[in-house]
Amino acid sequence: MKAFLDENFLLNTKTAEELYHYYSKNLPIIDYHNHLIPEQIANDIKFDNISQAWLHGDHYKWRAMRANGVNERYITGDASDEEKFIKWAETVPYTLRNPLHHWTHLELQRYFGITDVLSPKTAAKIYADTSAQLQQDSHSVRGLLRMMNVEAVCTTDDPIDNLRYHQQFAQEKESFKMLPAFRPDKAMNADDITALNQYIDKLEKISNREINDLQEYLDALKSRHDFFAANGCKVSDHGLEQIYAEEYTEQEIKSIFNKIRSKKEISATENLKFKSAMLIYFAEWDYEKGWVQQYHIGPLRNNNARMHRLIGPDTGWDSIGDFSQGRTLSKFLNKLDNGNKLTKTILYNLNPADNELFATMIGNFNDGSIKGKMQFGSAWWFLDQKDGMTKQINALSNMGLLSRFVGMLTDSRSFLSFPRHEYFRRLLCSIFGQDIENGEIPNDIEWVGKIVQDISYNNAKEYFEF
């Protein structure tokens, strides 16, 4: 019987152990998409306790706590940090076979050297030990990133962000890079005309120009795109239910924008046309600059209207959606490719039923110009766990070239989430190791080891050019 979370965790063969420990384990991390807070990195803050580092903003844990019958007061309410931690500790023993159980204990081991299993019996000591370590310089937010051998992090930033903290950080000599990512979701969201107009008003101020028509709007957004590029940005990102690819004319978009700016309601079709046009504009700008564009596709957000009213979005009320993806995705990519304006692209799928769809879609637009130009992105959100990652790896292996995959990312708000890269690398090595021992791929440990290194680090290094 293997010990829980020992050095060969998830490595089920001797070949897998060799691949992980000798080829993958010690490589740096390029985390090309996350939701870390730039201010916290720039100011190198220290968390007062483990709850602040672990529980604040982590809706993965919140959902588990609610399922375990924990009152909202101990999740997003006014309970003390220690009380919230105790409630999390009470929940952890019930998370067996949920990835939270693995992540929780990996993080305790890697950041704090704690091998005890978190439970009500160990909670008080673990809270005290971890909170004490977080007061040390070694466990400031930058210290936590250095501890995981992080080479680059890309935060997620709105076009109207002033990038003050990225600029502040860039003036310092640090062992890793912090770069912005252009996330213009709010700039194309015409579902709420009032909110969109408020956004446009903010864009007017930061771009120092009036916005009365479509061209002025595009010019202002393009100026922000240029500003991001001047501050080291090389990637964009979009969080969407599905790609929008409605047919439209420029005149139609001009008219729709005028209606939006006049605070008049637009039809459902006009909404789709506006979103479709904005996606194309953004993608063309990305192509001009040689950026990597990322599309996170498929969530059904804010399902619980009552809780959304009470505590707002991004608090754990989202799920996998079942949107139709293939035809619009093909149409969108084809329009860009036809105009020779399709840049390097990563497609992330949230519905595992669509894995093969996404894995084959990228093959339609790989044109030989760049190795792995079109990427089927790592399993994300509800799928970044053992089963979800295995399915994504297998779909990409069967339909494309796993060897050109740019690998894992955290997609997290937590500075303690970077062992997810280790989790991915262990799983990857386990899959290759088992294939070797099954006689399904050649027993050429140096070549397979190189492929593992490429997926773990080298491909991302070459692809993003950070």
Image: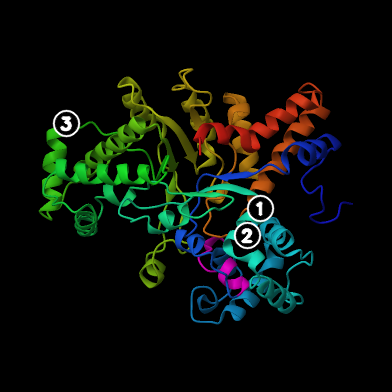
* Residue toward you, 53 or 26: 26
Camera-near label (3 vs 1) is 1
Snapshot quadrant of residue 345: top left
The residue most toward the right is: 1
Q: Is residue 241 magenta?
A: no
Looking at the rendered structure, the secondary structure element under dot 2 is helix
Snapshot quadrant of residue 144: bottom right
Labels 2 and 1 touching (C-beta < 8 A): yes
Q: Position of residue 284 (x, y in %)?
A: 31, 32
- Residue at 45% x, 21% y is 364
Question: Where is mark 2, residue-wise?
Answer: 144
Measure the C-alpha gap from mark 3 to mark 1. Answer: 49 Å
Question: Where is mark 3, residue-wise?
Answer: 249
Q: Position of residue 164 (x, y in %)?
A: 38, 58
Type of amino acid at the residue the image marks with label 3? Thr
Question: Where is mark 1, residue-wise?
Answer: 148
For this view, does 18 lie left or right of residue 416? right
Q: Is residue 56 magenta?
A: yes
Snapshot quadrant of residue 202: bottom left
